[in-house]
Image: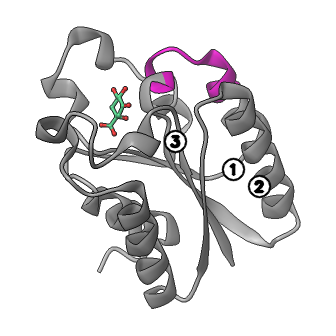
Amino acid sequence: MKILVLNGPNLNLLGSREPAQYGHATLADVQHLCERTATELGHEVECFQSNHEGELIDKLHEYGRLFRDGLALGVVFNPGAFTHTSVALHDAIKGTGLPVVEIHISNVHAREAFRHHSYVSPVAKGVVLGFGIQGYALALHGLVGDMS
Ligand code: DQA
């Protein structure tokens, strides 16, 4: 089954962006980790990143259709700063019925107050945060339902 690993704004800058907050691994490293983990779990990932809210919504709609047709399992989603602002992403997840695991590299609750609220969490199957890029592997295990 297909799993979408979806990354939002500025995550293309991983590796050079605020390394004290997000570490030194790049988005390509995240992709390799997700491909390896999905293979171990017997699934297949597509990795997609966009800085544009509408493109993230279009991708969720595409996977909503695949999910309905029994061809996709769900989404591991780091919405970046849109987490804290986007009613449209909330509605897209709700409207598609997609199982989504929200992931944040940093522990957003240990940071500025404006990062403490998520529009995505109420419509997510689960949330992983604060474990660096390893969180993507944890989120994949959570989505697949294999917590070993
Ligand atoms: C982030 C946390 C967000 O608050 C921030 O805007 C990001 C990255 C994380 O992975 O820790 O872009 O989603």
Q: CA distance from mark 2 to mark 1?
A: 8 Å
Locate the N terminus and report the quarter of the image it occupies. bottom right
Mark 2 sits on what residue? 63
Locate the C terminus and report the quarter of the image it occupies. bottom left
- Residue 122 drawn at (x, y percent): 50, 30
Mark 3 sits on what residue? 124
Task: Name the mark nearer the viewer: 3 or 2.
Answer: 2
**28 on left or right of 25:** right
Mark 1 sits on what residue? 98
- Look at the image and say whether residue 88 sits in the magenta stretch: yes
Magenta: main secondary structure: helix
Tell which circle, 2 or 1, labels the residue nearer the N-terminal end: 2
Residue interval drawn in magenta:
82-91
- Residue 41 drawn at (x, y percent): 47, 85
Q: Is residue 46 above or below residue 118?
A: below
Tell which circle, 3 or 2, labels the residue nearer the N-terminal end: 2
